[in-house]
Image (spheres, grey):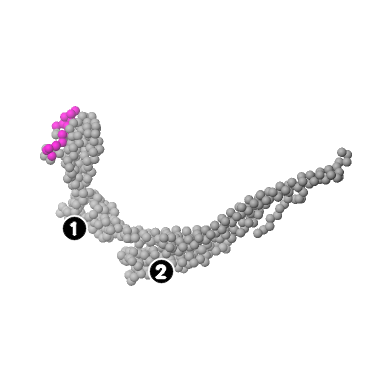
């Protein structure tokens, strides 16, 4: 602890000294005891920042691996194509789809049922009501003026939609300004068939819609079904009579969704055109996922290697020589070099992944060899990443053992926990020392202020003594006084 000097000139000058500056110097000396603690805290903070960064890199690597090990992940992705996209367009192929070729022919497309009325004037007043049903549902009646709507075609349309009866009502306007009521089923296919009540279909409550402004010649304003609801009919892989209420077919081929667009060009014998549907494994996405794994693994290894060096000032990096750094390096390299099973694809080498010539733990990917493995031994590649005891699950467990997840007790997590314990102790020591120094600052300030007041009062005290001495002895008086 350094010495603190007081500079107040001659003791009788009355100059005193700077109390604040003096107290600050003393406090600075007292605080020197904290310097080793703060230096250690700085070191621990730098170490924590590196550990946290490496934990993030391991998390990224774990995400890359999860894309390959999850049953519904990248390995399950499929692509598809249609030999005639004018007839059938492939929408998607899910994880449950199996790679292979299928034949599909379309006998007829699905239709949505619709109905329409005769034309009436836009402002004509209507009376009566309409009765209809959708599919096998109950008969429903909507009367003109229900819900206090206007007695016009547009008012009736709004009333039908408000009642939510399984159809979409709208008003179609002709070129001459007249209008028609249109009903379109909300359900496609035969199940959405619209049936208008009349003397035959529902004689007890037929449609009674009428135009009181311009009488129409047809009963019920001619409201009738103009398009029947029809299911699509297709043949898949020779199996005939497969039906779909919609032209979007989701269950004819497991995991595959496709859109029917037309029946195509009929063959010479009058049968429907046959379309080839090819489902493939999405090897492009898998190659991209494996390449991402290689890139992120190399980034992690480079970060580990950097910690074995010294910075530009010659100081060791925060994790230099630590056991956690050795754990990370050894764990990753050991898991990477393991082989599994007796299949052709039993190691990363068989996928075209090998060590770089620099021998720094980084790896490189031979894209052609990976593509060949995926195209010739796809199931083995999947097994290599996903089977029990496989590379993928072993590497996943290794990452868990090294991670910064406290729930998994990873090496990084334990190192961070140990650092936090030391940091807590050091911060407590600093806080206690600062509290003690704060008390000393108050006491020093009070004592030095008192001393300063005494120093500044000395000249006045000397004058008072001189005056008393002169008064008593007569010395020092002005002789001419």
Using the numbered discs, state the Cα–Cα distance from disc 2 to disc 1 in whole angstroms. 49 Å
In the foreground, 253 or 451: 451
Quadrant where the image shows the N terminus? bottom right
Q: What is the x, y in percent for residue 140?
A: 18, 39
Left or right side of 138 for 18: right
Label 2 SS: loop
- Tell me the quarter of the picture where residue 375 sits: bottom left
Q: What is the x, y in percent for residue 436?
A: 60, 55
- Report if residue 265 is visible in the image: no
- Vertical position of residue 433 compared to residue 113: above or below: below
| Dot 2 and dot 1 residues touching (CB under 8 Å) | no
Label 1 SS: loop
Q: Which residue is mark 1?
A: 238
Furthest toward the top, the residue is: 213
Quadrant where the image shows the C terminus? top right
Q: Which residues are magenta?
A: 202-217
Q: Which residue is mark 2?
A: 337
Residue at image x 15%, y 52%?
Answer: 270
Residue at image x 19%, y 28%?
Answer: 213
Left or right side of 37 for 396: left
- Vertical position of residue 203 compared to residue 91: above or below: above
Q: Residues within 10 Å of mark 1 (few under 14, many from 20)?
A: few
- The nearer-to-camera label among 2 and 1 is 2
Asked if residue 57 is among those painted magenta in the image, a careful observer would answer: no
């Amino acid at each position: 602890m350094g010495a603190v000097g007081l500079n107040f000139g001659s003791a009788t000058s009355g100059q005193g000294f700077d109390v604040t500056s003096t107290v600050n110097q003393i406090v600075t000396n007292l605080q020197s005891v904290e310097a080793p603690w703060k230096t250690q805290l700085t070191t621990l903070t730098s170490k924590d920042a590196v550990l946290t960064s490496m934990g993030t890199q391991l998390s990224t690597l774990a995400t890359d691996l999860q894309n390959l090990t999850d049953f519904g992940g990248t390995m399950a992705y499929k692509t598809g194509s249609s030999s005639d996209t004018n007839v059938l367009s492939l929408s998607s192929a899910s994880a449950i789809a199996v790679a292979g070729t299928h034949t599909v022919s379309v006998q007829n497309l699905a239709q949505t049922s619709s109905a329409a009325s005769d034309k009436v004037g836009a402002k004509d007043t209507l009376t009566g009501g309409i009765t209809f049903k959708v599919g096998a549902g109950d008969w429903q009646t909507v009367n003109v003026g229900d819900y206090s709507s206007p007695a016009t075609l547009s008012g009736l349309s709004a009333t039908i939609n408000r009642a939510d009866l399984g159809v979409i009502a709208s008003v179609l306007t002709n070129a001459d300004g007249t209008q028609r009521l249109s009903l379109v089923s909300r359900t496609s296919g035969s199940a959405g068939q619209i049936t208008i009540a009349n003397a035959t279909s529902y004689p007890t409550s037929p449609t009674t819609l009428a135009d009181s402004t311009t009488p129409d010649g047809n009963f019920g304003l001619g409201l009738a079904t103009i398009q029947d609801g029809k299911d699509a009919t297709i043949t898949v892989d020779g199996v005939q009579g497969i039906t779909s209420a919609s032209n979007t077919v989701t269950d004819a081929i497991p995991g595959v969704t496709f859109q029917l667009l037309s029946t195509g060009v009929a063959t010479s014998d009058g049968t429907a055109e046959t379309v080839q549907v090819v489902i493939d494994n999405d090897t492009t996405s898998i190659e991209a996922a494996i390449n991402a794994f290689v890139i992120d693994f190399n980034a992690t290894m480079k970060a580990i290697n950097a910690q074995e060096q010294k910075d530009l000032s010659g100081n060791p990096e925060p994790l230099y020589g630590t056991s956690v750094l050795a754990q990370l390096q050894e764990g990753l390299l050991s898991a990477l070099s393991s082989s599994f099973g007796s299949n052709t694809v039993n190691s990363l080498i068989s996928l075209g992944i090998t060590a770089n010539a620099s021998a720094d733990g980084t790896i490189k990917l031979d894209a052609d060899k990976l593509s060949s493995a995926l195209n010739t031994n796809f199931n083995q590649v999947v097994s290599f990443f996903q089977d029990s005891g496989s590379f993928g699950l072993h590497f996943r467990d290794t990452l868990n053992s090294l991670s910064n997840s406290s729930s998994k007790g990873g090496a990084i997590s334990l190192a961070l926990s140990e650092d936090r314990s030391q940091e807590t102790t050091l911060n407590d020591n600093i806080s206690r020392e600062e509290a003690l120094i704060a008390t000393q600052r108050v006491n020093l300030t009070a004592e030095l202020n008192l001393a300063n007041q005494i120093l500044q009062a000395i000249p006045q005290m000397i004058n008072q003594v001189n005056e008393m001495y002169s008064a008593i002895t007569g010395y020092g008086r002005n002789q001419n006084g």
